[in-house]
Amino acid sequence: MNSFNLGINGSWIFVILLALIIIGLSIYYYRFTVPQLSRWKKILLTTLRASSLALLMFILFEPIFTSIFGDVIKPKIAVFIDNSLSSGIKDAKIDRNKQIKDVIEATGILKEDPELLSTYLFDRDIFEVINFNKDSLKLNGQATDISKVIRRLIPNNDKNYRAGILISDGSFNTGNNPLYDVTVLDKPIYTIGIGDSSIVKDISVESILANEIAYLGDEVPINVAIKTSGYSSGVINVNLYENNKLIGTKELQISSNNQDFNPSFEYKPTTEGDHKITAKIKAFDDEITNKNNNNSDYIKVLKNKRKIVVFAGSPSPDLSFIGNILKLEKNVEIKTYTQKSGAEFYGDSPNQIALTEAEMFFLIGFPISSTPDGIIQMLKNELSNGKPVFFVSSSAINYSKLAQLEPYLPFTTISGNANEFIVAPDFSVSASSHPLLRISGSDKDLDLWNTLPPIIKTEHFVTIKQESEKIAGSKINNVPLKDPLILSRVFQNQKSIAILASGIFRWKLMGYAQEVSKGNTSAPDLFTTFIQNSIRWLSVDRQNKNITIKTTKKQYTSGEKVGVTAQIYDASYIPIEDATVKVKLNSDKGIKRDIVLNSIGNGRYYTDVEGLGEGEYSFNGEVFKGSLKIGSDAGRFSVGEIVLEYQNLSMNAQLLRDLAEQSGGKFYMPNNSSNIIKDIKANKKFKERSITIRKEFALWNLWWILGLVILLLAAEWALRKRYGLI
């Protein structure tokens, strides 16, 4: 049904009344003329004046012409074909490339009316292909994001997609879990599984678990996670390399009871810097692919003999338990200052030399009311130099003295008193990837942290600083509280951690120790892990670096954009906005690239680098203020060594089946997919969609209407001159 409407900004009655007045005045004006004109000339002049003035008045009321009409859009099908590397796998059973082309032929996708079908290729992104044919398939995508396919179908746009066809092996390795997105989809997805759902023969290096930080001369363990499938016997040879130099070898025996392995290597670095650790497996002849037989990680090696100073407001179990863990750290010198009831300390008193030599501070229930102001000032001066700090609260804290140190802590105190209550830690999902919470590097880590025993919190109410990250909140009887429990902060290269509670020794005594007493010797020691992770995290980039240039991560897949970022500060840690950041990239295969980073504000610079070939890269960045060089930084990264597409090579038939069932579609195997178009057309949801199109035209804004007013006035003026009117 079509409709039209002319609207104005005002009342039509008022407009009509004004029009009548304009007509009346025009008639009155030309009733008597000098010289006298004929009746028809008067009518012509009256008409010209009345029309021009009425039209001008009409424009002032901002008239808008609106047309509303209905239309029907025919239903369409969106076809999404997996263009990733895993879709091109060929083994003894199945050639997936050929299988996809056979499916395209069997379903008749190429023969259907283009008005019915739109065809897309997808891997990490989605690309519409006009005039699609079998040669459009490249099967070279480095990652698979099925969730983007679902989200592309969600909008009910003018194309009226009423169903989707997904041709894929169902193995996604980036983006959301598509089962989350399909819950809000209002149209069916018909899935066709590509590949073999049975177990394929493959051995892969899943990951390397190593400390992010190591120290010269210290032996550190490196664990390699190896996954096997399709083998019940055989010998796996694993080699570990440091910067392509062999440093260890392991031989693993596959059996029916032992198919996944986690061998441990001992690594002792001999030089400072970023060291690339690579694990490689000798391939079996009948593996489906050997492109997942290696994996790499990076370890930052720092100089040894660190010095840590511990301040405690009084002797406490927290002090004893933390001190015992600090003593386990190799090449670390610990100096502890424990305050007595007055201003004195047990043993030596703090002095300026000891604090200056310290690289890190632990504050356990410190400061208290009797803490000398001079010591707080010395500590404040050292923290102002960017030294990291680990803070544990207690009921004896003096909040007015603590306020002097809060510029270097993740929080600002609102109020506090000595009242205590018991809370359980509530670790947030958003912080699950934080280095402080790393145990095995898997999704199960967060579940383990949330099993920690409750600790003692005082009524210490704080505001979280903008740069801080909430690691854990608190809860009572499983009811979450708003108050944070554990915070971390990085600001101007100074790091801090705060636990706004005491009694954290209970994590060891009531957690790990209790499990061991029951005979569960494999239970994780979460208290020790947290303190050790904290030391390592606080140690990274301890130097007051005004210039930081790095890549967004250490390893990229082939074809992935490499993000290069920089933070530039002057000597007072004030961001430099107008610097020039030049970076030279060099690969082990002779690839060279010069780039310049773009300012994104507040002393930050960034750019994406595309088209880098596979290889090991180093970079050197230089920063200039005008023609003056003010600093530099360097680092390493690799491209193409991680091949996500080869991590899981079996068809994920269950996912494809769930996507189809939850959306109201159907799951097919290639051999029974020929009727898929027919089945879609028979679906009740596959129907035309009625739409209403509304168009508005602002008449007062049209140039030709104003031109018409001018033309009418000009015509009247010309005729008056011609008739000789006074």
Image: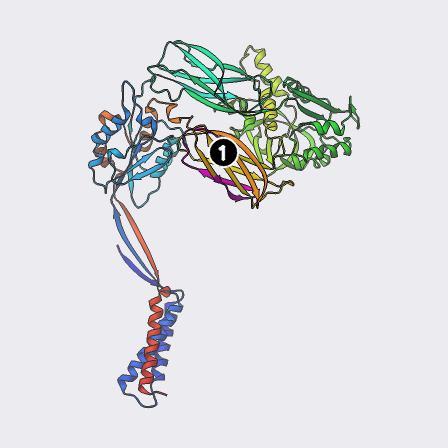
Residue placed most toward the observer, 421 or 461: 461
Q: Position of residue 168 (x, y in %)?
A: 31, 29
Instruction: Please tell me which residue lies in front, 675 or 118.
Output: 118
In the rendered view, does 148 fall on the left or right side of 566? Answer: left
**Which residue is drawn at the image coordinates 78% and 21% (left, top)?**
347
- Residue 185 showing in the rendered view: no
Q: Main secondary structure of the magenta part?
A: strand
Q: Is the N terminus in the top left, top right, bottom left or bottom right quadrant?
A: bottom left
- To which residue does mark 1 refer? 552
The image quadrant of residue 99 is top left
Q: Left or right: where does residue 446 sit relative to residue 645?
A: right
- Of all residues, the one furthest to the bottom in this rendering is 35
Residue 435 seen: yes
Q: How would you rate the neighbour count of disc 1 (Cα within 10 Å): few for under 14, some for 14-19, many for 20 or more?
A: some
Q: Residue at x 77, y 33 (%)?
A: 374
**Residue range highlighted in magenta:** 595-617
| Res 133 → quadrant | top left
